[in-house]
Structures are given as structure tokens and as C-alpha cells.
Image (cartoon, helix red, strand yellow):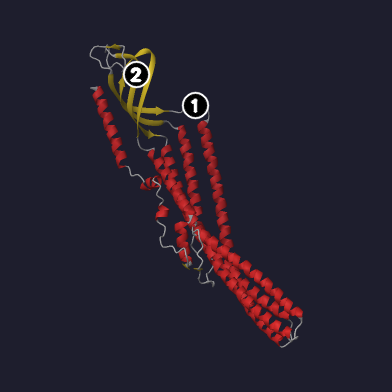
Amino acid sequence: MIRVKIRKIFFATLMIAIAVFAIYPYDTGIFAAESGVNPVAASQSSDVRESGGFFSLARCIEIALARNPEIAAAQWDIAAANSRLDAARAAFWPQVSTEGGYQRYVDSQRLIAARYNGEVGVFDNDLLRGDLVVRWPLFTGWRITSEADAAGKLSEAEKKKFIRTRDELIYSVTSVYFSILGQQKIVAALEFSKGALEESRKRVAQLYDVQKVAKVDLLRTEVRLTDLKQNFIKEENTLAVQKRILFSLMGLDVVPEKAVFDEKLEPTEAPIDLARLIETALKNCPDYQAAKDRTEAQALRVKAAKAGYWPTVSLVGAYGVRNAPSSEDMGKNTKSTEDIGSIGGVVTVPLFDAGLINAKVREETANLAASRERLKKLELQIRQETETAALGVQSNAARIKATEKAIEQAKESFRIESLKYDLARGSITDVLDAQSAQLQAETAYYRALIDYHTSMARLRLATGGNI
């Protein structure tokens, strides 16, 4: 009767465990990863125009978010963190396994233990066994709970890290895009200046032919024109490199020959409230929130390490068969194969581990202290980056206004010097210097615009996209 009850209890426990595993909600994304299906590649836009066309800033960001390898890698990091979370949570459930074995004894052993006094049995030097074993942790000193909570925090940290990676990519694309727009303006200004200087050279050459100017005026004009052509080639190469960088960020291998970039380059007035921006940055910056999650996860790891001081209680059940393949002694009405089952609780109390638990607790506590210090450092860094970006926006806005006035003054000076030279009242050097000053003022203006939009993008990055 006792044996029948044990069997019923064991099989009831086994059926409950099997039912739990049958309804356990597995993450289908993990199996997609194992099968080699890339969810990022599957979601990429299919209508990217790689052989020309108009590329707005929004379109470039869209393509970059769909194709950039770092974004794909960050999404796989999230999948890995979710898998670690599932692994930590799996420790709550019973573990079912099969075990088998063969043992050879010096002296013959009884196949199964005697169930009552005087019971005859089967004896053999060789014994075979096969068991179905269930182990279920009931109490671990909150170790499993702490480890699962820590894995959950780390999973959230990876998601926020992904947001930061996405924001950094948007910043990079935006910065390079506006650099291309400004560089196009610089190249256009150089091209216009080159054309104007070529016209000046023709005029000087004509005056030289009729001996109204000295040859040195013609030579000076040609030298300036040569320098301008070299500068034009240099700036064109810079523009080509910037386009290559942009399309690399977009995950594209080839730069379209006729790609068109056009966006409003003029600055937009944005009020700067530094105190509010710093508060917003600390509240919304994803890398700061991710660092907080990692610190909280480390605190849970300390708790998990301290759980090693506590005893553990587990439920253990087993059911299997024993076989004597070449029995030497068989009692009357006995069989060479018998089944056996058991269920019960196991308590493990740590008594001596040579300081292993203490060392683990000290290690995790030290890691927690280091994590808190890094969190403080990151807070200071966010404050500094936000303040620097905000000041950059203000200074670059002031530079734009100043260079606008400089362009007006340079254009007027060039007009006056050209008129004086035509009236034989000025030198070609003054004309060339005035033209060079106008080009420098225009170049400074467009570089100020580039720096302004870059600092605005950096400010959005520092504040988590909230200005």
C-alpha cells in the first residue's frame, strides 16, 4: 500500500510538472534567432533608391535605422538579454531529467532493498538502472528571485542602450547631413569665386595687352586663381568624403552619383533654458537610465550572493527500473527487473566553504560600489555635455549673425575695390584681397551654420531627444 501511494504521489507531481512546461510561454524571437532569420533584415525598407534621387534628412535617418549594422547588433543584444532573463526565470520551475547507469560490484548486491523482513530477492554483481528524476527548488534564500530580478533589470538596460545607440546614429546622420549641405554651399561659393576670378584674369589680360597694367598684376591674378582651384578641389574631395560617411552610416555600399541633398540650412530660433535642459537630460537620457538599471541589477546580485548563507530546500522525486542482467541468486517468485520510485525533500545547509561565499559577497559588493561611482560620473558627464551643447548653440547662433554682417561688408568692399581698379585708382592686390575676404566671410558663414546644426543635434542627443 505504501508503495502504491508513493507511485501515485510521484506521478501526480510529474504530471503537474509536464503540464507547467507545456503551457510555459517561450519567446518565439529566440527560435527565430536560432533559425538564422534576422528580424532587422526582414524589416528593412525595400524601396531604397541606391542609384540616385532626393535624400531628405528624414529619409536618410529612416534608411540608417533600417540598415545600420550597429542598430542590428544592438537588437541582437536585446535578444540575448531576454534569453538570459528566460534562463534566470527557468530556475523557478522543476527540472526533469532521465538518468541511466551501469555498476559492477566486487560482491553481489541486492537488486532492490528489502521491503519487509525476510523478503527474498535477486542478487548480482552487475546492476543496470534507469530513472526519471524531478528536482524542484522550494527555497533558496531568495537567490533565484534576486537573479531573475537582476536579469530583468539588465534586459531593460539593454533596451535603453539600444535607444541610446539609435539616438547616437541619428545624431551622426544629422551632423554629417548638415555638413554636406554646408559643404555644398562652400563648394558653390568657391565655384562662383573661381568664375569671377577667371573673368578678372581675362580683364587684366586685356588691360595688359594694351599696356595699361603691369605684368605683375596678371601674375598675381593667375597665382590667386591657381590657389583657388586647388582649394576648390580640396573642398570637393571633402564633400565626397562626407557623402561616403553618410551612406556608410545608412548601411549602403555605393554612393549614388546623382544624390540630391536639400534641406533648410538657416538656423531656427530655439530658447535655451539650461536648468530645464539638464533636468530633462537626467530624466530622459537613455544611457543614464540604463546605468541606473545596471546599478539596481548589481544590488540584486549582492542579495543573490548573500543567499549563499541560507539553507536551500528542494523537492526531489525519481522513478525508474533496476535490472540484474546475469543474476547469480534469485529467490522464489522474484524477477530480474524491478521498478522503484521515491519522492521527498532535501535540505542543504552550508557549514564550511573555505570563505567562498564571503569572497563572492565582497566581490559583488565592490562591483556595486564601483557601479554607483560610475553612475555619479555619468551624471556629471551628462551635465557637462548638456551645458557644452547649449553654449555651443548660443555661440554658433551669434557667429551666424556676425558673419552675415561680415558678408555684407565684404561684398561692398569688393564692389568698391573693383570700381576703383576699373577707374585706375586702385591696385589689383586690393581687388584680389577684397574678393578673398568675401569668400572667407561666406565660408565662415556656412561653417557657422554647420556648427550650429551640429550643436543642436548634440543637444538633442544629450537631452534624450527632448529640447
Question: Where's residue 355, x and y in %?
Answer: 53, 30
Q: Is residue 325 visible?
A: yes
Left-right relation of 66 to 331: right
Q: Is residue 132 above or below residue 27?
A: above
Q: Is residue 277 visible?
A: no
Left-right relation of 232 to 6: right
Disc 1 crowd rating (10 Å Cα; few below 14, some 14-19, many 20+) is few
Q: Residue tagged by mark 1?
A: 352
The residue shown at (25%, 15%) is: 334
Identify the mark nearer the N-term, 1 or 2.
2
Q: Mark 2: which amino acid?
A: Leu
How far apart marks 1 and 2 lie (CA) works out to 35 Å
Closer to us: 464 or 237: 237
Left-right relation of 143 to 364: left
Residue 266 is drawn in which quadrant?
bottom right
Question: Where's residue 44, x and y in %?
Answer: 42, 57
Question: Where's residue 215, x and y in %?
Answer: 76, 80
Q: Residue tagged by mark 2?
A: 127
Q: Is residue 418 above or below residue 262?
A: below
Closer to us: 331 or 352: 331
The residue shown at (43%, 28%) is: 349
The residue shown at (66%, 72%) is: 228
Q: Mark 1: which amino acid?
A: Phe
The residue shown at (70%, 80%) is: 431
